[in-house]
Image: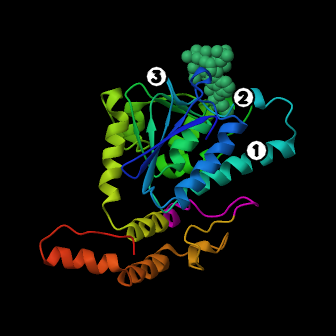
Amino acid sequence: MYKTLHTDLTDNILTVTINRPDKLNALNKDVISELGEVVEEIYTNADIKSAVITGAGPKAFVAGADISEFQGLSKEAGKALSAKGSDIFFRIASCPKPIAAAVNGFALGGGCELAMACHFRLCVPNTKFGQPEVNLGLIPGYGGTQRLTKLIGRGRAIEIMLTGRMVEATEAHTMGLVNYIVTEPDELLSETRKLLGIINEKAPLAVARIIECVNIAAGDGIAHSETWDPDPFGGDDAADAGDAPVNGFAREQEAFGECFGTQDMKEGTAAFLEKRKPRFRGA
Ligand code: COA
């Protein structure tokens, strides 16, 4: 179905593997476009409760945007490339279903940005993160200047982006760039899926609202490019208001109230009081 991606849906978790190992899974136009398609599949396929993105081969998650496609691009084409990738990454960040990155090696440039757009990250010990665009006379273009700053703080983000240096897994973990280092590389996917499996048992409408409210706090997942139309819930709630600033506390209160209107909240509280496991249905 996809040319550059391999997908597998097991236990309601979609595993998306970027499959260009001979080019260290660099994001060329085809990969970007298919990532856009698979993200829409995650939004719309009710059998998918969560997803994990990883890279094929033993060496790389994604070694960046495909540099071979850069030469000869005009200013306008560069901006359009950035807008297209950014919109897809915003769509990942805003997805009401959790999307994790299983980072299995180099996560550079667009690879680091893709991992950061995901809701959380696990990696193997030999992972190297980085935003080396400055070495090419470029800057990060898929949200890296914003997301890295928010994840690890201004001073550390500026130093990493200005030097273009690589950040090893242990340092990335200390900085909060990655949630867990999985010691055995062979267990990276199973550990990521285990974490997603835990979330898949929670109430989906509550999960979606937590992601939405946290994204507001992080200033992430909200419209920024001219082509962006965020509508994760299809309604007219505050977070759908495009570039208008959203008060996260106000949205949290509204979303908290919305949960009281769900069957799942009634089930969750009843199950607690009846000392049994809840059965959530996403309603
Ligand atoms: N775009 C296009 N091709 C890339 C790529 C990228 N971002 N990253 C790696 N590749 C290709 C290499 O050109 C090479 O292709 P070839 O075998 O046809 O020559 C192949 O992937 C393997 O990479 P190679 O450089 O030989 O592996 P390495 O182990 O020596 O080095 C890296 C690994 C990640 C350090 C190195 O590939 C690199 O610096 N990549 C670019 C990282 C970057 O600048 N990313 C940001 C882009 S905006």
From the top left corner, tell me how far across and down residue 138 is, in percent. 73, 35
Say if 197 sits above or below 282 in the image. above
282 and 253: which is toward the camera: 282
Q: Which residue is mark 1?
A: 81
Query: Which residue is painted at 37% across and 39% down in the image?
Result: 174
Q: Is residue 200 left or right of residue 45?
A: left
Q: Is residue 179 left or right of residue 35?
A: left
- In depth, the one of 208 and 19 nearer the eye is 19
Give the residues in magenta: 215-228
Residue 171 location (% of width, % of height): 40, 33
What element does badge 2 sit on? Answer: helix
108 within the magenta span = no
Residue type at the position of mark 3: Pro
Q: Secondary structure at mark 3?
A: loop
Q: Which residue is mark 3?
A: 58
Q: CA distance from mark 1 to mark 2?
A: 12 Å
